[in-house]
Every structure is written in C-alpha cells, then in structure tokens.
C-alpha cells in the first residue's frame, strides 16, 4: 500500500539540502510505490546509497508529516517486499533540517546479490541496478553473473561446529528485555540456519556456550615487553561477551582531575567513552570470523589499541570508510546488535569516533584494521612529574567512588563485601574492589575486621 501524498510546503520556505542527486544519493518528495526498486538498485550496486524522502529533485527540503508512521511503513515494505533478506543492510530514521523533518534511508551494498522484488521473482522485471542517478532493469546475463559471484562463505552458510548442542537462553533474555516476543520462529527469524536447515556459525556465535573469546591484554609500558594482565571475555553469547568487554574497559577508563585554569579543575576520563564504545563494537560486528580469528584489545601505558581481522570490506575504500559508508561484513551480527540497541544508525559509528580522534588513529593492512586511541594528555602529564606519581592515588584517582562508599556506611556498623555492593547497587566485583574498597582501605578510611586474613570468607569492613 502506498502512503498518501505528503504535504508540500510553500516554495518560499524551502531550504537547500544537497545540490544534486548522484550514483549514491536519491531524492524523493513523497513516498511512492517505486521505493523498493530504488532500494533493490542500491543493494545491487557496488557502494549502496542514501534515499531522502521529503527532498525535491533539485535538493530543496520540503519536509514530511507523521515521520514515525512513515518510518514504520518504509521499514515494513523493505523487510517484506525484497529478497534475499535485507535485515542488517538498511536503516531508516528521521532527520531535522531547520524546522523541517525528512526521512533518511541508508542502504548498504548487499552480499547476496542479486536482490529482487519478491512479487516478480528473480527476473528482469524485479531486479534492478543503479546507473548514474537512475535505475535500470538487470538483463538475464547480469542476473546470472551476479548470482554466480554471490558470497558463499558468509557466516550464514557455514555450519556451526556444535550443531546439536546449542541453547540460546542468554540471547532470548536480551530480546525479551527489549520488548520482543519470543516464539518458535525466533531462531529462523535471526537467520540461524543454513539453507540446508542446520544451525550456522551465526548461531554458534550467539549460543550460550562456544569457543569464541576476545582477548584483552595489558602492558606496563608502551611496548609488548611487560605483560601484566591477560584476560579473555567470551565462551558465551557474543552480545553478552561484548557487554562484559565494555564493562571491563569502563573500569580501565579512569577518571582524573584536570587543571583547567587558576583554581579551576574538571573531571575527565583517559579516553572518550563514546568513541571507545563505537570502536569496540565496530571491531566485533565487522570482524571476519570465517577463519576463527577474533578481535584483540591491548592497553598500554599511553594508549589503547583495538585490532579486528579482515581488513576493509571488498569494494570499500579508505575514503569511503571515513565518510561512514556502511558495508556490513556480517549482516546477521549487525542486525542483532541493532535490534538490541548496541548499534544506532548504520555508518554513524565512524563519525562519532572522528569527532574526538583523527584519521591517523587508524591503520589498515590486507587482513587487519587497527585503531589506536592515545590517552588524554592531562592524564599522561600526571606521570611526567615524579612528585605527582607518588601522590596520584591520593589526590586524583577514584575520589568520587570512595566518597560514595563512605557516605553509605554507618559508624560502628560492620559490612560484608556483598552488603557494600548491594548498598552501591554494583554487580561487578572487580569494579567494586579496585575503584571503591581498595582505595578506601589504602587511604585509611575503612578497616578490615580480620586484617591478618584479608581473603577470609568472614571478612567484614567498618569505618575507622
């Protein structure tokens, strides 16, 4: 069903959006019955593209009414009217330009070409490609050529190493918490089966147990000589492992006091939290798992590096990468991360990173992508002065966590570790120990009831 025509604003209120359409940009004043053709053409193109609804052919912003309803209509049509499945390859959201609202549809290049309109089947009548600023039907020979090059080694087509022993309770809990209804088609809807009906490698990655883990290594200096910590996060659903990794890095991303002027201080973190999160999720979502190689995160004394396997997706240049052009390597993983709000708009992660760090942070090779974020200079400056090193713990680190802990404890009361974590509403023991309890004891604010047996199961804590 075609949505009713959208109200066109008076010409004198129009504002310029883009100067012209091109091979990756399409303008539409209103939603028409040709939308699916445009989406199919971009899916079959080398780079994908962007469709803007509420923008005239000359680039003037007209705007649309009822954006929420229109987004749902567009999403439903793209999901249900095009084959193979488009889930993970498109995104629909509204944008504000001055006082007008438009709809932006991001379409990635598909990896199961040729895509076609469901009602016409795999034929020239339903299969299209983008040529310049227009759309053309594909010829039978073009369709056959595309089909012969269709990606065969995608995760969806690789059988799970543990096909007969998977459960998905962790993933189901995540989906239920987001308001999704879990039914008998849950696994099928997530493309967890090969064409032959076996659980695939995507299912393996999101199963309750697997052999996949992400390593986080920590070094005392600027090189890999002195390894002081080496932990693995995984062997569980990939979404759960990702959350554990982000929690760990949140602990490592210490807050410090930065002097901003005479008698003026501000609280900052070693790394920008948003950029760090986006880089980690990008590495996990776009990693090439077909060789069973996983991302690696390394923490040095002056920086953090995040390395993913696979290099740039074929057909994506460095320039297009930095422009935020989205070409998901793993459509099924992207779809799940987007369902669970770990990913926002397709292609938006790079722009968030580049708003805080330069392109020089990235390093590309044939098989790997590495991003290296330097720590805040104000944090590093604390260690350039020997007099600051000895007093760093006392004057800067974790004071707000310690104050929060002390505020909740009563004089002459004794508390177990579990009691204190419940008071603080904390679940991570490492976070509690390193950022709350340990510094409070070292500063002499709290004492142990059994000081000669710090690890005793009967150990309790009280104010001094």
Image: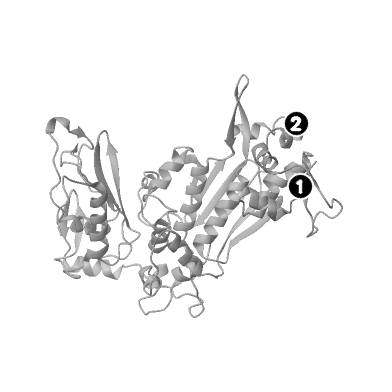
Residue at 46% x, 52% y is 282
Residue in front for this viewpoint, 424 or 228: 424
Secondary structure state at the residue bearing disc 2 = helix
- 369 lies left or right of 128: right
Horizontal and vertical percent for residue 301? 66, 42
- Left/right of residue 462 with respect to residue 158 in the rendered view: right
Instruction: Report x, y in % for residue 303.
Output: 60, 42
Which residue carries the number 1 mark?
413
| Residue located 46% across and 42% down the image | 353
State left or right for residue 366 relative to residue 4.
right
Crowding at mark 1 (Cα within 10 Å: few <14, some 14-19, many 20+): few
Which mark, by number, is residue 244? Answer: none
SS state under label 1: loop
Image position of 305 with respect to 208: above or below: above
The residue pinned by badge 2 equals: 386
List x then y, in percent, for residue 275: 49, 43
Locate the N terminus and report the quarter of the image it occupies. Answer: bottom left
């Amino acid at each position: 069903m075609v949505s009713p025509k959208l109200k066109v604003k008076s010409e004198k209120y129009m504002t310029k959006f883009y100067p012209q359409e091109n091979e990756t940009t399409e303008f539409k004043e209103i939603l028409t019955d040709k939308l699916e053709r445009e989406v199919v053409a971009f899916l079959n193109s080398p780079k994908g593209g962007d469709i803007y609804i509420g923008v005239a052919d000359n680039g003037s912003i007209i705007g649309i009414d009822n954006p929420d309803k229109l987004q749902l209509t567009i999403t439903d049509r793209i999901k249900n009217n095009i084959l193979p499945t488009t889930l993970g390859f498109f995104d629909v959201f509204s944008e504000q330009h001055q006082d007008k609202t438009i709809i932006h549809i991001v379409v990635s290049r598909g990896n199961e070409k040729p895509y076609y309109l469901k009602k016409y089947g795999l034929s020239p009548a339903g299969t299209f490609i983008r040529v310049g600023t227009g759309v053309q039907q594909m010829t039978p020979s073009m369709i056959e050529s595309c089909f012969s090059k269709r990606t065969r080694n995608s995760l969806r087509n690789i059988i799970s190493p543990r096909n007969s022993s998977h459960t998905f309770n962790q993933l189901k809990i995540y989906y239920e918490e987001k308001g999704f209804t879990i039914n008998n088609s849950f696994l099928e809807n997530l493309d967890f089966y090969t064409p032959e009906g076996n659980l695939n490698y995507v299912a393996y990655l999101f199963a309750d147990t697997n052999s996949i883990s992400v390593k986080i290594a920590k070094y005392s200096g600027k090189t890999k000589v002195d390894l002081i910590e080496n932990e693995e996060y995984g062997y569980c659903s990939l979404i759960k492992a990702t959350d554990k990794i982000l929690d760990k890095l949140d602990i490592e991303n210490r807050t410090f006091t930065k002097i901003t002027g005479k008698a003026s201080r501000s609280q900052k973190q070693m790394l920008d939290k948003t950029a760090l999160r986006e880089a980690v999720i990008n590495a996990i979502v776009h990693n090439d798992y077909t060789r069973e190689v996983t991302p690696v995160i390394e923490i040095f004394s002056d920086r953090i590096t995040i390395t993913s396997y696979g290099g740039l997706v074929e057909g994506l240049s460095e320039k297009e990468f930095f422009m935020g052009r989205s070409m998901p390597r793993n459509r099924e993983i992207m779809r799940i991360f987007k369902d669970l709000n770990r990913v926002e708009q397709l292609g938006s992660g790079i722009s968030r990173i580049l708003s805080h760090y330069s392109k020089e942070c990235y390093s590309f090779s044939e098989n790997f992508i590495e991003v290296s974020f330097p720590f805040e200079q104000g944090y590093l400056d604390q260690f350039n002065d020997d007099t600051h090193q000895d007093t760093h713990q006392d004057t800067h680190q974790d004071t707000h966590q310690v104050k929060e802990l002390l505020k909740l404890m009563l004089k002459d009361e004794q508390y177990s570790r579990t009691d204190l974590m419940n008071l603080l509403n904390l679940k991570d023991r490492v976070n509690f120990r390193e950022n709350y309890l340990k510094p409070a004891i070292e500063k002499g604010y709290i004492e142990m009831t059994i000081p000669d047996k710090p690890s005793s199961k009967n150990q309790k804590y009280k104010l001094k």
